[in-house]
Image: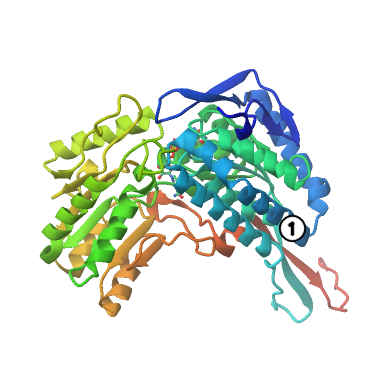
């Protein structure tokens, strides 16, 4: 490891760098070797982080104006951009994404912080004219201590989705990165310190699921903002019930991508390839169920398979690499098990389906395309989080909608057509938090993002995200000059 990447052997709690007796080995998924060790939180660290975050709520941070909070977030955005290359190197080492992709993500993380920095002093309560002899208004107050529990696919970007609105509205935050990608959050902690946030406003606790579970159960935590699998979200909800924590969940997806025969096929194909295989398919919004209208079905499958076969799989720091390895051996094994299930289910394999040649080590899987999949099969129903897509035919609008909605997920839906009235008709009937027409998953800091059904609870991004980090307090002031009569004459 190059020393310039930073130190990862301490936790960031209450503005101090705290050593730990435990460590997580950070594995490079291209080599399968540990590239560094990262301090791991123990039970006592969870206690001290919650105490520091609670103290910060009523300290200097609690006294800052919204504008001053925004200025600190803007400073953090500047620092994330300044260090984008270094942070991207850390993340790519940990999660195996091509370095160029991660650099782009880190710049976007700065955009997210800037949006919420600017929005900090633009969220208002309201005055409610419920009576002429009373003044009634609402105050939007911070929820309190937020535990942000994160996955491994885009650690800093997703942390900024949570940090931005949580800090803009005056909360304090404990960041718990995934045990698969612990290092970059420690580096982010150092930038929080450099930006000048008061101690305890942001704390960083790398660790395993037991650290997440301890935060979810802790009575001093007011809200869990979680991105990860639906199975973990269910466990968190159970642990969080003790003090009725507010819970926001961004879980997985099995996103339908519907291509009508009148669509611009070139554009639909390029987008399908990108959204199925980018990030090695480790994206919650991957277009993993592609429905194609029968007249263009065979052509679409064959051409997507051609593109998949051309994708260069390789190490994340090779500039020729299109997609890297999967992040962990568990994830690679999971993907391979779904490829086996796909084959057993009778789906026809047109591309991939195996490890790419030429790699003795590394968690690599080739981009894989199945056609003639059964929409009720596990291949088509369960989230794989790998570079595997399943293509199925349909006849007409009604069947497309029925197939697309026949899933327990509902994160993103895409449809491709040149018929503008059909576009709106179908968009209204797709059961997902985001529907894109002739584009796919335009994820942006201004656009609310989140899931229907098992894909989650709540929305991130935009002003919806800010409101989700506030409690509404209603204040009513009697303005009348009447004297009350005896209430119990
Ligand atoms: P995961 O659920 O295994 O882990 C996510 C986080 O939860 C990790 O930090 C982990 O340590 C923690 N955790 C595990 N068990 C816990 C428990 N019992 N209590 C509290 N915390 C616990 O998910 P993952 O494998 O890291 O990420 C992949 C999943 O994330 C996929 O399902 C994917 O769809 C989803 N994801 C969703 C979005 C989105 O915005 N909707 C974005 C990225 C990833």
Q: Is residue 164 visible?
A: yes
Image quadrant assignment for residue 189: top right
In the image: residue 485, left or right of residue 455: right
In the image: residue 49, left or right of residue 182: right
Packing grade of label 1 (10 A; few <14, some 14-19, many >=20) is: some
In the image: residue 317, left or right of residue 119: left
Q: Residue at x 32, y 43 (%)?
A: 383
Q: Residue at x 23, y 61 (%)?
A: 402
Identify the residue at the far front of this view: 319
Q: Is residue 201 visible?
A: no
Q: What residue did someone put label 1 on?
A: 71
Q: Is residue 281 above or below residue 463?
A: above
Pick the quarter of the image with the C terminus.
bottom right
Say what secondary structure mark 1 lies in.
helix
Q: Position of residue 299 (x, y in %)?
A: 13, 59
Pick the quarter of the image with the N terminus.
top right
Q: Position of residue 451 (x, y in %)?
A: 42, 55
Residue closer to the observer: 174 or 369: 369
Residue closer to the observer: 419 or 43: 419
Residue closer to the observer: 104 or 117: 104
Judge: label 1 CB < 8 Å from ligand 1.
no
Q: Position of residue 228 (x, y in %)?
A: 46, 42
Identify the residue at the far top of this view: 21
Colour scheme of the rendered structure: rainbow
Q: Residue at x 38, y 43 (%)?
A: 282
Q: Residue at x 30, y 73 (%)?
A: 423
In the image: residue 4, left or right of residue 359: right
Image quadrant assignment for residue 441: bottom left
Q: Position of residue 236 (x, y in %)?
A: 51, 38
Marker count (numbered): 1
């Amino acid at each position: 490891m190059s020393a310039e990447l930073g130190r990862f052997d301490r936790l960031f709690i209450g503005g101090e760098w705290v050593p730990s007796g435990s460590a997580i080995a950070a594995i490079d998924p291209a080599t399968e070797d540990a590239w560094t060790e990262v301090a791991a939180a123990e039970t006592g660290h969870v206690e001290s982080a919650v105490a520091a975050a609670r103290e910060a709520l009523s300290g200097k941070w609690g006294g800052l104006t919204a504008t001053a909070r925004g200025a600190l977030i803007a400073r953090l955005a500047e620092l994330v951009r300044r260090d984008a290359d270094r942070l991207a190197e850390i993340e790519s080492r940990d999660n195996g994404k091509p370095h160029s992709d991660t650099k782009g993500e880190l710049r976007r993380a700065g955009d997210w912080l800037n949006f919420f920095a600017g929005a900090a002093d633009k969220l208002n309560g309201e005055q409610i004219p419920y009576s002429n002899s009373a003044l009634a208004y609402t105050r939007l107050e911070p929820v309190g201590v937020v535990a942000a529990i994160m996955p491994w696919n885009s650690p800093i970007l997703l942390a900024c989705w949570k940090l931005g609105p949580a800090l803009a509205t005056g909360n304090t935050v404990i960041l718990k990165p995934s045990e698969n990608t612990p290092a970059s959050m420690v580096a982010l902690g150092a930038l929080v310190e450099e930006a000048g946030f008061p101690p305890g406003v942001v704390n960083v606790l790398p660790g395993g699921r037991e650290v997440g579970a301890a935060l979810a159960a802790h009575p001093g935590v007011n809200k869990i903002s979680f991105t990860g699998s639906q199975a973990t979200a269910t466990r968190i909800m159970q642990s969080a019930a003790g003090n009725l924590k507010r819970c926001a969940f961004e879980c997985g997806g099995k996103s339908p991508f519907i291509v009508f025969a009148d669509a611009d096929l070139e554009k639909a194909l390029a987008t399908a390839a990108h959204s199925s295989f980018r990030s090695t398919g480790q994206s919650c919004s991957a277009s993993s169920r592609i429905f194609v209208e029968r007249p263009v079905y065979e052509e679409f499958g064959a051409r997507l398979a051609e593109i998949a076969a051309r994708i260069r799989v390789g190490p994340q720091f090779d500039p020729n690499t299109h997609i890297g390895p999967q992040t962990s051996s568990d994830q690679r094994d999971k993907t391979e098990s779904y490829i086996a299930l796909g084959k057993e289910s009778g789906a026809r394999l047109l591309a991939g389906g195996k490890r790419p040649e030429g790699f003795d080590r590394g968690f690599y899987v080739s981009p894989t395309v199945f056609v003639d999949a059964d929409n009720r099969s596990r291949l088509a129903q369960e989230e794989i989080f790998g570079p595997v897509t399943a293509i199925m035919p349909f006849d007409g609008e009604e069947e497309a909608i029925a197939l697309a909605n026949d899933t327990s997920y509902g994160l993103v839906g895409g449809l491709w057509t040149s018929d503008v009235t059909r576009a709106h008709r179908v968009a209204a009937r797709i059961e997902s938090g985001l529907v894109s027409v002739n584009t796919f998953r335009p994820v942006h800091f201004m656009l609310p993002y989140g899931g229907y059904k098992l894909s989650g609870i709540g929305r991130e991004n935009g002003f919806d995200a800010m409101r989700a980090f506030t409690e509404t307090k209603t204040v009513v002031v009697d303005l009348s000059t009447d004297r009350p009569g005896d209430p119990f004459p």
